Image: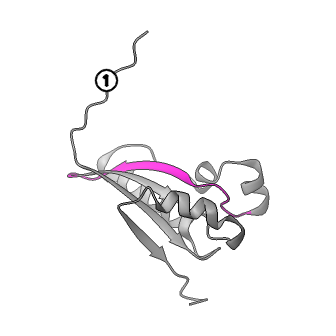
Amino acid sequence: MAKAKFERTKPHVNVGTIGHVDHGKTTLTAAMTHILAKKYGGEAKNYDQIDAAPEEKARGITINTAHVEYQTEKRHYAHVDCPGHADYIKNMITGAAQMDGAILVVSAADG
């Protein structure tokens, strides 16, 4: 069976979340998918769907980059949720290399 041809109907933008460990990058990513899914359609992702690997769930941190997609009226976004822990900087750099722009997440409590 032939794969369906993908057609771009909107400009695509590659964005992502970066920042220190436990500052809320994955939580923000999940919230964005929920808000945009309600307004423009698409799939809302929960936190545990983004950090899906067993080790990520057990430790409560992002280890591997995760990719989610959402859209607005004018654009389609491919979003890379990057790890913030220093041990996984290589994974963060790999994710950041795919981005056109990034959202820097900083905890208001930690600064």
In the displayed structure image, the side of residue 61 where residue 29 appears, left or right: left
In which image quadrant can residue 34 be found? bottom left
Q: Is residue 30 visible?
A: no
62 in the magenta segment: yes
In which image quadrant can residue 8 be found? top left
Residue 78 in picture, x, y percent from top left:
40, 51
Q: Is residue 41 above or below residue 16?
A: above
Quarter of the image with the N terminus in it: top left
Q: Residue at x 72, y 56 (%)?
A: 56
Q: Residue at x 66, y 48 (%)?
A: 52
Q: Residue at x 57, y 71 (%)?
A: 24
In the displayed structure image, the side of residue 83 where residue 7 appears, left or right: left
Residue underneath mark 1:
5
Q: Is residue 33 visible?
A: yes
Q: Is residue 81 above or below residue 40?
A: below
**Circle 1 SS class:** loop
Residue 39 in picture, x, y percent from top left:
31, 53
26 in the magenta segment: no
Q: Residue at x 53, y 87 (%)?
A: 108
Q: Is residue 99 above or below residue 76?
A: below
The amino acid at mark 1 is Lys
Quarter of the image with the C terminus in it: bottom right
Tell me which colouring the rendered structure shows: one colour
Identify the main secondary structure in magenta.
loop
Q: Which residues are magenta?
A: 60-74
- Within 10 angstroms of label 1, few (less than 14), some, or many (20 or more) residues? few
Q: Residue 57 versus residue 97: which sits nearer the camera?
A: 97
